[in-house]
Image: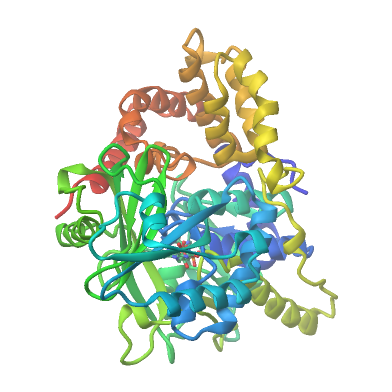
Amino acid sequence: MDKRPFSVKERVSRLEEMAAAPLDVLVIGGGITGAGIALDAASRGLRVGLLEKQDFGAGTSSRSTKLIHGGLRYLKQGEIKLVQEVGRERTILYRNAPHIVIPEPMLLPLVKGGTYGRLATSFGLWLYDRLAGVTRKERRVMLSRGKTLQAEPLLRGDILKGGGLYIEYRTDDARLTIETMKTADQYGALCVNYAEATSFVYEDGIAVGIEAADLLGGGSYRIMARKIVNAAGPWGDLLREKDHSLTGKRLHLTKGVHLVVAQDKFPLRQAVYFDVPDGRMIFAIPRGGSTYIGTTDTDYAGSLEKPRVTREEVRYLLDAANAMFPSLRLAEGDVTSSWAGLRPLIHEDGKSPSELSRKDEIFVSPSGLITIAGGKLTGFRKMAERVVDLAGRQLEQETGRSIGGCITDRIVLSGGGFDSPESVPQAIKELTPLAVSAGLGEREVQRLVGKYGVNAGLILERAKAAVPGPGKGLAAADRLLLAEAHYAIHAEMAATIGDFFIRRTGMLLFDRPAIGKALTPVLEAFAAELGWDGEQRTRNREQFDEEYEAAVTFR
Ligand code: FAD
């Protein structure tokens, strides 16, 4: 186990260690797929490195609908095996990370002219429950029209015929990625953000290493590895192109957009998965003081790093929400935040974006590069198992070493160390006296545990202690903010204020108004901890302003 803190200050030492001796497995890409592979490989005793050119999760893995699906829509596509697998995976994830994988009852309203009638929905949900292995108490309930309206009074009454209530699980995708990455780190994987794999190193046509660029410190490294895994999501084909192996199946990128509206403008009581006039279905999900709506699914060919939400997409989602919840009359000005993400799907001739399979596939190129493409957040553990099984078999053949089987179904993710998922409320109660002694209350503990799980205690301890330096003499809420920033820098490798406000805390998405007051103290804390000069401080602020602007303005 690696005892070094997962601190941004330890990035360079990790890069140096990667370059010092050949790795067994080098993973390119620090989204959920790469994080899962790093954890799986490290927990089998392999020497593992992972490079992420942006922040961890900054690609698709912070831009999803944030659900750990049982895969209801796959049932519609006849993908029975996938429904079974993601159902099983959901149960495992709930057990291993109960702080960020939380049951969420989902209402499926039945409307005149909708996709399915009552019988088909009842049967579909019944079958789904059986295939996905849903526990008895979480099985679907069919509701009368009256009961459906009681569950969600905002629904359009004149077309409503009834509803089905079933269980989905909500998550925080960026936090799931960072918790998986931190767990991989605890098992000794060397994971570094803001480090790009720029080219491959070959010996006799076999990829035996990569050249890496440290995008923060400016250094460059040659990292050798017996197996190289391309887990670059939407960037996967670019790496195959660099490897001269972009033949056969290719990626098909589709864009999905989500909008966030304050709860007082969209006071949704209950998550709803509803029909849109064009035949698609979208989600409206309450979260904290907001409700988010999504998603779209359209072909995409623009910037991979910075997909933007367009005015047309805003109109489409607001029209859909206004049609199903007519009292809202939502307008563009009601949108408090937004995000756009790219699905790295595998192309199938003649299929529309929504018809493309979400299945994952592994390609092995003549150079030995292993690429994993497609897939879902929900299935990341299983995807990782398949990749490491393959890499492990190859390593066994090539080196004669014996490599163990996958154990990640039994690995509790960082922050997830509760006695059981049911004991999370008790853990919140137990942490409350500590919060009170820091001048805080149970509400803050709930919020912290919902992000950091059992690690919330570490943040509270710091908030309680007189924070040296910039935090001294501050109000309790401000000390807590600085304690979170400190934790992000030194335990979660946050390198910029964007990492903090977007992916470590989700504030830009779900608590944007609070950023106004938090921005300067957090910027000062990062500058003090990381020794930024005036220019670095300005650059960081400008980069964040750009991301902030992208979340709130549409072209
Ligand atoms: P990414 O998260 O994109 O990670 C790839 C990483 O590789 C990037 O961070 C990138 O910076 C890095 N990289 C690229 N090139 C290099 C290089 N040369 N060197 C170093 N790093 C590099 N799934 C669910 O289960 N539930 C959902 O609710 C859900 N909703 C979705 C909604 C939308 C709109 C979208 C787009 C997807 C959704 N998904 C959902 C799917 C899920 O989000 C993705 O399958 C998953 O996040 C893909 O993760 P990844 O790690 O493969 O890719």
Q: Is 43 left or right of 94, judged from the image as shown? A: right
Residue 191 percent across, percent down from the top left: 60, 53
Task: State the residue in front, 48 or 362.
Answer: 362
Q: Is residue 178 visible?
A: yes
Residue furthest out toward the top: 473
For image coordinates 23% across by 61% down, the residue present is 158
**Quarter of the render that holds ligand 1:** bottom left
Measured from the top left, where is residue 406 in percent x and y?
76, 69
Residue 516, given in percent of the width and then of the height, sits at 30, 27
| Residue 7 in sight | no
Q: Is residue 504 above or below residue 252?
A: above
For the point 51% across and 10% down, the residue is: 472
Image-based side of 84 in relation to 274, left or right: right
Q: Residue at x 48, y 78 (%)?
A: 74
- Which quarter of the image is occupied by the C terminus? bottom left
**For this rendering, which residue is in front, 437 or 26?**
437
